[in-house]
Amino acid sequence: MINLLFFLTFMHSNHEKQVRQLAFAAHLDPIKLCLVKCASIAAGFLAMALFVIILGMVFLAALFRFYGFGGFILPVILTILPCLLFFLGAGLLLGGIHANILYVLMILALSLGFLQNSLSLPVFFDLYGSEFFSAHPLTLPAGADGEPAFSLPLSFIFGRVFFSGTGVLMCLIGVKKYF
């Protein structure tokens, strides 16, 4: 999330504001320009996240001879996309107010990552999913192979929808404030 917010600092820098004036003078649609920049930032973030995920897969394959990664797709999507949308929206919205607020948001994102397990937040407010993915499997009964079957409570799904919807709403407001 911090890398995503660093990417957003480029959109709100003084140099970018000068370039933005030239781009708008060239009859470029400002909304399309902002959406292309947001899409490139999201693609860069997803590429970095994919690299870390692949590195984890190589680790599991090399050390434990584990190759059944299909069960990881849903948890990865439910973890990364709501965080991406929420922080992209918050960064666009708050960066439009003042660029330095993005650095405060980076500190909050980092602090939330470290403090989330110790805060014992409800599953609904578990933005990164760390508390959920560490505590929830311990409450499930073990299957025939000794592993619990993967299931998601409705409160976790509603939390993902809430963070995604809030992020999209903040993105829409942030795009309008961009120009």
Image (tube, rainbow, N blue to C red):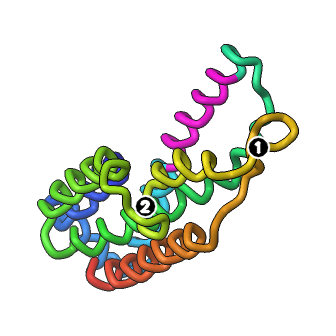
* For residue 17, side relative to residue 168 (left or right): left
Please name the residue that numbered disc 2 is placed on.
127
129 with respect to 100 (left or right): right
Q: Amino acid at mark 1?
A: Ala
Magenta span: 46-60
Asked if residue 47 lies in the magenta stretch, the reply is yes
Residue type at mark 2 is Leu
- Label 1 crowd (10 A; few <14 / some 14-19 / many >=20): few
Residue occupying the point 87% across, 39% down: 144
Residue 150, x across and y down, in percent: 73, 52
How crowded pointer 2 is (Cα within 10 Å; few <14, some 14-19, many 20+) is rated as many
Residue 43 versus residue 52 in the image, above or below: below
Q: Main secondary structure of the magenta part?
A: helix
What label does residue 71 carry, if any?
A: none
What's the distance in space between the residues labelled 2 and 1, CA to CA? Answer: 26 Å
Q: Is residue 130 above or below residue 145?
A: below
| Residue drawn at (43%, 61%) of the image | 127
Please give the name of the residue rendered at 46% of the width and 77% of the height, measured from the top-left corner: 168
Q: Secondary structure at mark 1?
A: loop
Q: Residue at x 30, y 58 (%)?
A: 8
On residue 142, the disc is: 1
